[in-house]
């Protein structure tokens, strides 16, 4: 029996793309900070001239799947992270955006074969979003960790070849 698992220690050469929504940037900026902190503490160069990391900003969460698809198709990235915050309001707009961004991100991963970490918060209130972006804990850290694990796992599967 062969067991495949991602590791968090072998990050040399791992290329990560992050797509971040500007809408609700009070939340998404904090998620990005948490994600970058995690990646940095696990050996990823997150500096401005980093050969391992690129960050693409989009207007809102609805636009995340298209940019994630472009990045995935480029062949430059081992894994992508998507960061957004969709907060329920008084209209059905929330349901439309959440549905489309979640389906779109899943489709990118399936269609292109690059893991895409779904880091789009979907909350009822701004308070809930802020709690998940750093007041209580920062889920950006978790999304960074998931990216490391999936990038490593995909590398291990590729190395196994026809196993």
Image (cartoon, helix red, strand yellow):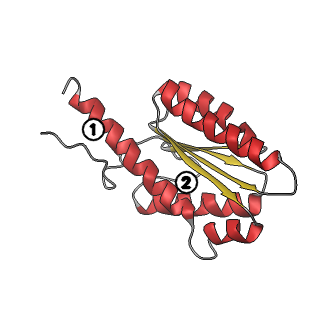
- Using the rendered image of the protein, determine whether residue 144 is visible from the camera's viewpoint: yes
Query: Can you say which quadrant of the picture contains the N terminus?
Result: top left
* Side (left or right) of 34 relative to 151: right
Image check: 65 left or right of 107?
A: right
Which residue is labeled 2 in the image?
47
Residue sitting at the far right: 90
Comparing 48 with 125, the one in front is 125
Q: Indicate left or right for 146 with 101 as reference.
A: left
Element under disc 1: helix
Is the residue 41 above or below the residue 136 in the image?
above
Q: Is residue 75 left or right of residue 103?
A: left
* Image quarter hosting the C terminus: top left
Q: Quadrant of residue 156?
A: top left
Tell me the tag on residue 156: 1
Give whichever of 129, 18 is nearer the camera. Answer: 129
At 44% from the left and 37% from the top, the residue drawn is 78
The answer to whether residue 44 is visible is no
């Amino acid at each position: 029996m062969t067991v495949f698992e991602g590791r968090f220690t072998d990050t040399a050469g791992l290329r990560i793309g992050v797509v971040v929504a500007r809408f609700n940037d009070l939340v998404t900026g904090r998620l990005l900070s948490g994600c970058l902190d995690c990646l940095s503490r696990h050996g990823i160069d997150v500096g401005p001239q980093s050969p391992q990391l690129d960050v693409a900003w989009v207007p809102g969460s609805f636009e995340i799947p298209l940019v994630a698809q472009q990045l995935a198709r480029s062949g430059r990235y081992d894994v992508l992270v998507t960061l957004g915050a969709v907060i329920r309001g008084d209209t059905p707009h929330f349901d439309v955006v959440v549905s489309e961004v979640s389906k779109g991100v899943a489709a990118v991963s399936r269609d292109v074969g690059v893991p895409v970490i779904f880091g789009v918060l979907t909350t009822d209130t701004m308070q809930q979003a802020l709690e998940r972006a750093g007041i209580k804990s920062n889920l950006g850290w978790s999304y960074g960790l998931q990216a490391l694990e999936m990038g490593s796992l995909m590398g291990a599967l590729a190395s196994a070849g026809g196993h």
